[in-house]
Amino acid sequence: MLKCDIIHLSSGNPIELRKALEHRGMDELLREYFNHGGTLVGVSAGAVQFGKSAKLFQLFIGDSGEKINALQMVDFDFLPHYNRWDEAYKKKVRAYAETSGTTVYAGNDGDGLIVDNGKIQLIGDITVINGNQN
């Protein structure tokens, strides 16, 4: 797998995908691949995995108090499908960002971002929820 040009993480339930990656021991393999210049691509739940945590999705299903860390390849959380979430959930996301000091990049369907050598390129109408400034 480390010889692939690109590794793609697909969509689904972000928390279940997180648990599956951990269960299969993929965390270190993906970090090694990334640290050696490999290209990682994620869609929906797959994109969430590169961030700090899956806490945003715990807020959606009801917070169990358990912290589910993601791969932490970037210093922010990504929230896909922002256009599908209701205002009550978006309010919880803003509160999470403020209380945790976490920046959240929220993308509508079809939007995304590229992180290359620490530089972030926004694709589409990305909402940036910065916990340090709100």
Image (cartoon, rainbow, N blue to C red):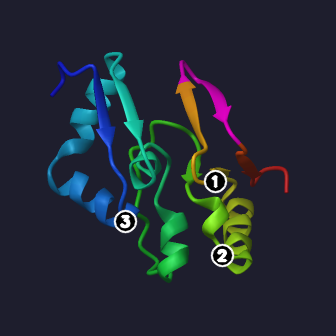
Magenta stretch, residue numbers? 116-124
- Please tell me which residue is depicted at 65% across the width and 35% down the height of the picture: 123
Q: CA distance from mark 3 to mark 2?
A: 17 Å
Q: Earlier in the sequence, mark 1 or mark 2?
A: 2
- Please tell me which residue is depicted at 14% across the width and 51% down the height of the picture: 24
Quick one: 119 or 45, which is closer to the camera? 45
- Please tell me which residue is depicted at 50% across the width and 49% down the height of the picture: 52
Q: Amino acid at mark 3?
A: Asn
Q: Secondary structure at mark 3?
A: loop
Q: Quadrant of residue 14?
A: bottom left
Where's residue 106, x and y in %?
Answer: 65, 53
Q: Residues within 10 Å of mark 3 (few under 14, many from 20)?
A: few
The residue under label 1 is: 108
Report the side of 28 relative to 109 (left or right).
Answer: left
The residue under label 3 is: 13
Q: Secondary structure at mark 2?
A: helix
Q: CA distance from mark 3 to mark 1?
A: 17 Å
Q: Give yes or no for contact between labels 3 and 1 (Cβ–Cβ under 8 Å).
A: no
Q: Amino acid at mark 2?
A: Tyr
- Label for residue 117? none
In the image, residue 41 above or below residue 6: below
Q: Residues within 10 Å of mark 2 (few under 14, many from 20)?
A: some
- Label for residue 89? 2
Q: Earlier in the sequence, mark 3 or mark 1?
A: 3
Q: Secondary structure at mark 1?
A: loop
Q: Amino acid at mark 1?
A: Asn
- Please tell me which residue is depicted at 57% across the width and 40% down the height of the picture: 75
Q: Residues within 10 Å of mark 1 (few under 14, many from 20)?
A: some
Where's residue 30, x and y in %?
Answer: 27, 34
